[in-house]
Image (cartoon, grey):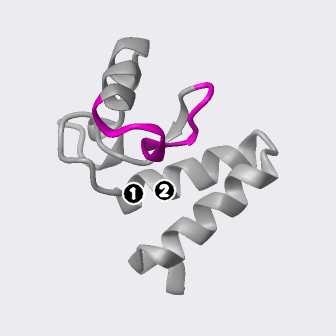
Amino acid sequence: MAKKGWSRRAPKTKGEREALYARCGAKAFLDPKNLKFPVMAKGGPCVLDCAGVRAAKTRAAQFKRRKVGAKAKRLSKRAACSWTHR
């Protein structure tokens, strides 16, 4: 079965993350210093991906990273992601 959604678009390897950072800058990550919690797709334009923000928010909660989770929530509201208004 083919993957679809954020898991297909997410930058997983260090090289993909570094390339995304070089192309889009610090705004592509919620923790840009460590290249963690990407919120933009690896191959597309430098546009916020709501699925990426949701994944980052979920992962931040799993790792108990409250500041990152709060940043994801603010970002999702600013971007008017559909899942924010539930």
Residue 22 x %, y %? 33, 26
Judge from the rendering whether residue 35 lies leftward or rightward of residue 41; answer left or right: right
Q: Tell me the SS state at disc 1.
A: helix
Residue 28 x %, y %? 42, 43
Task: Write down the region rendered in magenta.
Answer: 23-34
From the image, tell me which residue sits under label 2: 53
**Residue at the spot 50% in from the left edge and 70% down from the top edge:** 76
Distance of mark 2 from mark 1, alpha carbons?
Answer: 5 Å
Q: Residues within 10 Å of mark 1 (few under 14, many from 20)?
A: many
- The image quadrant of residue 16 is top left
Kindly identify the amino acid type of the residue bearing the numbered disc 1.
Ala
Kindly identify the amino acid type of the residue bearing the numbered disc 2.
Val
Q: Are marks 2 and 1 in contact (CB under 8 Å)?
A: yes
**Residue at the spot 62% in from the left edge and 52% down from the top edge:** 58
From the image, tell me which residue sits under label 1: 51
Q: Residues within 10 Å of mark 2 (few under 14, many from 20)?
A: many
Residue 71 x %, y %? 65, 59
Residue 8 x %, y %? 27, 37
40 is within the stretch colored magenta: no
